[in-house]
Image (cartoon, rainbow, N blue to C red):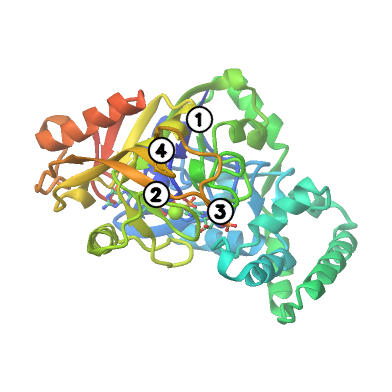
């Protein structure tokens, strides 16, 4: 049986913290897409750690962690992460596994990402510059190298061939940065990667499912960054939605049980692209401050705005969300009134659907006002502790979205979560 946990907005919903909270109930935590563009923040013994590629179950010794075939893997980042988690007592050689079919991010993919963004100028996507787009292009273009290829004696020859191809593209972009130090680091990291548990991920996971083990698939990014259903072209290059679990791990749809969607009590986005409820005023600034909204991967300030139920409803529909987690409710503690987006005015016409083209139309959010709670909710332990205004806010979301909020996260700490 597989439960899925994924973000319903533009990423950074607090997925890492929630996976870490649920991990003791699962045998396996599996990443199925994305790569080091992700930054999942966890607190272990009160200390903060950000995971980019290692699944967020790594600190639970009885939970195995799989990096699935749908991920694009940067060996250099992985090596650093493995060293970082070891300082917290995690042993990746014991409880982490990497699929042979996982595609590798090469140093030239990172260079191509940078070159492509530079060429786009004003229209740039705001990529994390981790090489995600170029690595997935090489996967679908049938050029990429995979983790299993590391075990082949021709790996270096094949690497050089692909590198040459990339060099021609970089020349077209007039990209002249010296990346030789990146390459040196890459080969050292490749040697390290060879020493990890490299497995046939699809057999590995299906054998365990057949034996009755429970899997939690950990999404990266968010549904509005999905390559098909997000705010294209301001998206990432993978399927971040539930459908991505099937191809990203090699599992059948009949194995999926719950789809747990994570949403903030408000909304953020980092990088370019449409964001209908964005606040450009002091309230937006205050949200950024209260929520400490700065990117876990790039440190960039996140754009902030009110919760968007049009986008949330759309994301729940595409993912088949059965349960919701609302994070960062405590961040709204001092805000009153609160606004909730219940519709879009697109070129003056009201709709409750996400339009095909969000970039070239004017979208004005239709807002409904709610009283804030003006109470410190970070200390709440049970549903009964939550102020009535929080309960009303949640009841409205449940009714609009058609899936229930079952947990409210009220602080970054491991224990700051209230089950409803
Ligand atoms: P992810 O990418 O979805 O895992 O989310 P990030 O780690 O990028 O960003 C979420 C940020 O919010 C991190 O700094 C978390 O420590 C923090 N966080 C998570 N849940 C809560 C919460 O309920 N309240 C507060 N105040 N912070 C939270
Ligand atoms: P987690 O898993 C927030 C955004 C980037 C950019 C766009 C494309 O921590 O929620 P890419 O590097 O994928 O080519 O960038 O997607 N982005 C994220 N935003 N959280 C993430 O991951 C993100 N991963 C990518 O900012 O706008
Ligand atoms: Mg993040």
Q: Can you give x and y, in whole percent of width and height, for residue 104 in the image?
A: 72, 55
Ligand 3's image quarter is bottom left
Q: Quadrant of residue 366?
A: top left
Q: Which residue is mark 4?
A: 349
**Which tag is nearer the camera, tag 3 or tag 4?**
4
Q: Which residue is mark 1?
A: 319
Figure check: 238 above or below 281: above
Q: Earlier in the sequence, mark 1 or mark 3?
A: 3
Figure check: 291 above or below 166: above
Q: Earlier in the sequence, mark 2 or mark 1?
A: 2
**Which tag is nearer the camera, tag 2 or tag 1?**
2
Q: Label 1's element?
A: helix
Q: Quick check: can you spot residue 401?
A: yes
Q: Please report the residue visible at 62 percent of the width from the left and 45 percent of the height from the top.
A: 238
Find out whether the residues at labels 2 and 1 contact each other: C-beta distance under 8 Å.
no
**Which tag is nearer the camera, tag 4 or tag 2?**
4
Q: Earlier in the sequence, mark 1 or mark 4?
A: 1
């Amino acid at each position: 049986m597989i439960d899925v946990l994924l973000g319903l907005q533009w990423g950074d919903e607090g997925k890492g913290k929630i996976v870490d909270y649920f991990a003791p109930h699962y045998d396996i935590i599996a990443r199925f897409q994305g790569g080091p563009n992700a930054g999942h923040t966890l607190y272990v013994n009160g200390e903060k750690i950000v995971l980019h590629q290692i699944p967020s179950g790594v600190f639970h010794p009885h939970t195995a962690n799989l990096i699935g075939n749908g991920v694009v893997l940067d060996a250099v980042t992985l090596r650093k992460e493995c060293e970082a988690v070891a300082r917290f007592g995690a042993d990746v050689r014991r409880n982490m596994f990497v699929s042979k079919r996982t595609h590798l991010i090469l140093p030239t993919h990172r260079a191509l990402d940078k070159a492509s963004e530079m060429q786009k100028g004003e229209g740039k996507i705001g990529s994390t510059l981790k090489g995600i787009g170029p690595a997935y292009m090489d996967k679908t273009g049938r050029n990429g190298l995979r983790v299993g290829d590391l075990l082949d004696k021709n790996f270096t020859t094949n690497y050089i061939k692909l590198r040459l191809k990339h060099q021609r593209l970089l020349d077209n972009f007039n990209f002249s940065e010296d990346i030789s130090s990146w390459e040196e680091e890459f080969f050292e990291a490749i040697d390290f990667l060879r020493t990890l548990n490299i497995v046939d991920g699809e057999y590995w996971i299906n054998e365990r499912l057949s034996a009755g083990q429970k899997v939690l698939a950990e999404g990266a990014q968010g549904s509005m960054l999905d390559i098909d259903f997000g705010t294209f072209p301001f998206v990432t290059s993978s399927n971040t939605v539930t459908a991505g679990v099937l191809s990203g791990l090699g599992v059948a749809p009949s194995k999926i049980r719950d789809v747990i969607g994570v949403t903030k009590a408000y909304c953020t986005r980092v990088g370019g692209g449409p964001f209908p409820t964005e606040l450009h005023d002091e309230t937006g600034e205050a949200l950024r401050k209260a929520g400490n909204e700065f990117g876990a991967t790039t440190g960039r300030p996140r754009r902030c705005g009110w919760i968007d139920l049009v986008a949330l409803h759309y994301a729940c529909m595409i993912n088949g969300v059965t349960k919701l987690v609302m994070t960062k409710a405590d961040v709204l503690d001092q805000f009153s009134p609160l606004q909730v987006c219940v519709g879009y005015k697109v070129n003056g016409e009201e709709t409750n659907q996400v339009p095909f083209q969000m970039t070239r139309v004017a979208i004005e959010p239709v807002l409904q006002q709610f009283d804030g709670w003006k109470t410190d909710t970070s200390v709440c332990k049970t549903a009964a502790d939550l102020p009535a205004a929080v309960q009303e806010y949640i009841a409205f979301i449940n009714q609009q979205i058609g899936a229930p909020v079952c947990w409210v996260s009220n602080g970054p700490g491991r224990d700051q979560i209230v089950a409803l």
